[in-house]
Each structure stands twice: as C-alpha cells, then as structure tokens.
Amino acid sequence: MKTIDPAVNVCLTSESIDRSYPIFIDGGLLSDRELLDDLLQGRSVCLVTNDTLSELYLSQVLAALGADRKVTVVTLPDGEQFKTMMAIEQVLTAALEEKHERSTVFIALGGGVVGDITGFAASTFLRGADFIQMPTTLLAQVDSSVGGKTGVNHPMGKNLIGAFHQPIAVLCDTQTLETLPDREFSAGIAEVIKYGLIADKVFFYDLIDNAEALKSRDPDVLARVIARCCAIKADVVSRDEREGGIRAILNLGHTFGHAIEKEQGFGKWLHGEAVAAGMVMATRISVSRGYVPSAVLDDLLLFLKTFDLPCTPPSGMTVDVFLRAMQGDKKVQSGRIRYILLSALGEASIVEDVSESEIAACL
C-alpha cells in the first residue's frame, strides 16, 4: 500500500500497452521506504547522483532502499558541462560490472542533468530498463523529470543525443528545495512562469500575486505550484509524447535559450536563466505582432526581476550568432527554424516566419 496518493498521474496509453505513471509531491519522500518498496517490488537498483547531492541526500535514500537490496551507486561530477556521452558510459559500465539485469531499476537522484543522463542510460541498458526520477531542484520537479525526454549534449547543440524513455514514477521531495542555492531556485522559477504563459492565464497571475511567497519558499505554495506545473505538462505530454505537434509549446523561450547556452558554453548560464531571456524575446515578438498586450510583457519582466533572472540575452550575441546556433536546434524542420510564440496569454503556437528584424529588436 502506498503511503500517499500521487498528486498527478501522467497517462500514456495505447491499445497495446499502458505506460502511465504517478508523480508524488510531498516532503520527506526520499526517506519513504514503504513507497519505494511498493514501486520497486524487490528489484535491484542502480542509483545515479552527483558529488554535490550525494553529500546531502544519498545516505537517507540508501536507508530507505534497505540493506537487503542490491544497490549500485554511480556518482557523477556536478554540472551541465558533464552531460556528455562519457557520463552515459560511466553509468552503463558500473551497471554492467555489477552484473545488473534488465529488471534493475535505475534511480536518478539529482537535478535535470542527472535525470537526463540516468533516463538515457536506462533506455539503452540491455535495450531498456525502468527508471525512477527523484528530482532535487525546482526546475527538475516542474519540468525535466516529467515527460520522458532524456539525453546528453553535444558540442554542436543541447540535448542532441537522447531518447524518449518514460519513468515508472516521479518522487518530488519538496524538502530538497530548502537546500537549493538561490540561483538554482530562480532558474526553476523561469520554467514555472512558462506554464502560465503557454497554458493557464489564471495560473500566470496567481504566480505574480504569490511572487514573494515563492521567493521565501513557502512550502504550501510551492507544493501547489509544482502540482499545477506537472499537471499542465502531463496533459500536454499525454496528447503528444514525442513532440510531433502540441508538445513543442513547452519550448517557449527554449529555441533562443538553447542558443544562449551553446554560445556561452554549457554551464555558464543555467538552463532556466537562458530560458528566461529566451521567453522575454519570444514575448516581445508576440507583443510586436499584436498577439498579446504589452502589459503581459511588463508583468513577466517584473516577475523575472523579482528572482534576479536575466531579461536580455548576453551582450555580443548578434542576430547572426543566434541564427547560426539555432540552425542546430532539434526542432528545425526542412532547414526552417521553428519558434514558439504566444498567440494569447495562456496559449502558444508554433511559427516559422520570425524575421531577422524581429530578432534584432529583442537584442
């Protein structure tokens, strides 16, 4: 029996298989042995974390997994710059050396980098093993841990090597946000406000009204906000798992943001910081086209500044630099860059006709 009911369910079904999974959101989940026993059903574990998170949470997770279970721990270096094929090889080598079987469950204990690496490694291990997400950052809890996108970076672009591989469960322990550095917390806030912009205008204004409570990390407000973000993403993913259509709206600000990350060097700008600047660029273009009123941009800028998030791209990134970097984006089709713009507050659409002059006006 599960100790708590899931806050959100991701429902991915077909005639042949049900791949739905629960998202649990609560404090203390990393120590919940009953919940882990229920999810793992006696199976062995390959637990992947990084050298920062291992000092904070590894001991309590190992205690919850129990001494009678076979557990292999893989500790990776911390940082976006280490999200490479070398990390995948490190995880797979450890699992193979310890003679894990296909029944083994991989567990990702960390932020989005650890989650993406672990999920991709699990998808390739013996042609596919289950994995559980234990996201420890706000960005991972509201975004990267949900939806099954896994992968690593390449010098030519972000997340260009990977696979769609859904977890069997997501455990969002809100207590981990208490130790999250301010910069990392703010980076997650950028993904939070994105959901209001693309899917729920009431949620957008609710976030603005509760900006100070969020900044102070009020646990009740955070739990409610995380649940709403996960619910929005779960709904979108259930309708378009592999980003063939509507799922692309989740990338508001990401086309510009990924270009910033690539040009600055992975890890110099946090993902959420680059997305924040990218969202402002996309919203400016949406305003200039008359899709949304300028007040939406004003509200977004004020909200982002409350969390010390960048609202402009790095100096020196010209239109040509952006265009060159964005040509390597995963969403490019038939050589055409696809952008996500707001068609209204709470609605987004995919467009291909953004001009160089429109980009220049954002710089």
Image: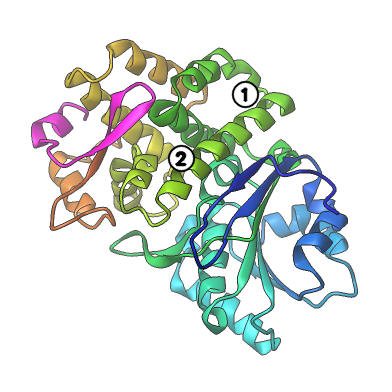
Report if residue 179 lies within the magenta region.
Answer: no
Does residue 360 lie above or below 352 as drawn? above
Q: Which residue is mark 1?
A: 214
Q: Quadrant of the N terminus?
A: bottom right
Q: Give the image quarter of residue 62.
A: bottom right
Q: Which residue is mark 2?
A: 272
Instruction: State whether residue 72 appears in this view.
Output: no
Q: Which mark is residue 32?
A: none
Q: Quadrant of the C terminus?
A: top left
User: How dense is the environment of label 2, judged by Cα within 10 Å: few (below 14), some, or many (20 and up)?
Assistant: many
Does residue 328 lie above or below 272 as drawn? below
Q: The residue tagged with tag 1: helix, strand or loop?
A: helix
Residue 357: x and y, percent? 9, 31
- Please state which amino acid type lies under the numbered disc 1: Leu
Residue 24: x and y, percent? 70, 45
User: How dense is the environment of label 1, judged by Cα within 10 Å: few (below 14), some, or many (20 and up)?
Assistant: many
Does residue 135 lie above or below 285 as drawn? below
Q: Is residue 155 left or right of residue 213?
A: left
The region drawn magenta spans 341-363
- Please state which amino acid type lies under the numbered disc 2: Gly
Residue projecting furthest to the right: 67
Q: Is residue 159 left or right of residue 169?
A: left
Q: Give the image quarter of residue 265.
A: bottom left
Residue under the point 39% across and 19% down: 301
